Amino acid sequence: MTGSQTAATARPGPAGIDPNALTYQQLQGWNCALCGLPLGADRPLGTVTIARGATHTTYEVRGCAPSCAETSTGPAAETEWRAALEHAAGCRACQTIGGGCSEGEQLLHAYEEAARQARSGGGA
């Protein structure tokens, strides 16, 4: 990274969560900060703080209740989730809150669909 580039810095989060890897939906408390699925029943996990320049924003992150392990999404969804995270790690638009990357959104929707199918018994 050159001196002219700026990066978001983050204080380590609870449960080993990397705040820079969280999506907008996870930061807003709509999706689980651990598994990424939309939340129904949830539980607080703690807070993460992301710094962009002089602005520090603290978010309360939430997780699946009773736990993500009890709502396993199976290998197909894990593959989709990995693809979405790998894309987001290298995509400037995905790293900007509300950045609106269509490829990132497609990958996220593919993951959510695979997870829904796994939970309903229709997935691998």
Image (cartoon, rainbow, N blue to C red):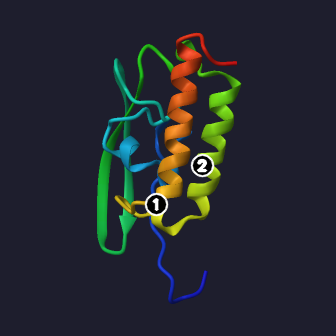
Left or right: where 31 falls relative to 58: right
- Residue at the (51%, 22%) spot, across then down: 116
Q: Pointer 2 and pointer 1: residues touching (CB < 8 Å)?
A: no
Q: CA distance from mark 2 to mark 1?
A: 13 Å
Tell me the amino acid under the disc marked 1. Cys
Q: Residue at x 37, y 36 (%)?
A: 46
**On the image, numbered disc 1 is attached to which residue?**
101
Q: Above or below — where is 35 with respect to 68?
A: below
120 with respect to 83 (left or right): left
In percent of width and height, residue 25 lies at: 37, 43
Look at mark 2 in the image and give the residue it sits on: 85
Residue 47, x across and y down, in percent = 36, 42
Determine whether, in the image, residue 73 is placed left or right of residue 59: right
Q: Label 2 sits on what residue type? A: Leu
> How many numbered marks appear?
2
- The quadrant of the image that shows the N terminus is bottom right
Q: Earlier in the sequence, mark 2 or mark 1?
A: 2
Residue located at (59% from left, 58% from top): 89
Tell me the element at label 2: helix
Judging depth in this view, the residue of 44 and 80 nearest the camera is 80
What is the quadrant of the C terminus in the image?
top right
- Locate residue 57 relative to residue 102 in the image: left or right: left
Closer to the eye: label 2 or 1: 1
Secondary element under disc 1, as helix, strand or loop, is: loop
Residue 12 in sight in this render = no
At 70% from the left edge and 26% from the top edge, which residue is drawn?
75
Which picture quadrant has residue 99? bottom left
Q: Give neighbour class at mark 1: few <14, some 14-19, many 20+ (Cα, 10 Å).
A: some
- Observer-nearest of 123 and 42: 123
**27 or 94: nearer the eye?**
94
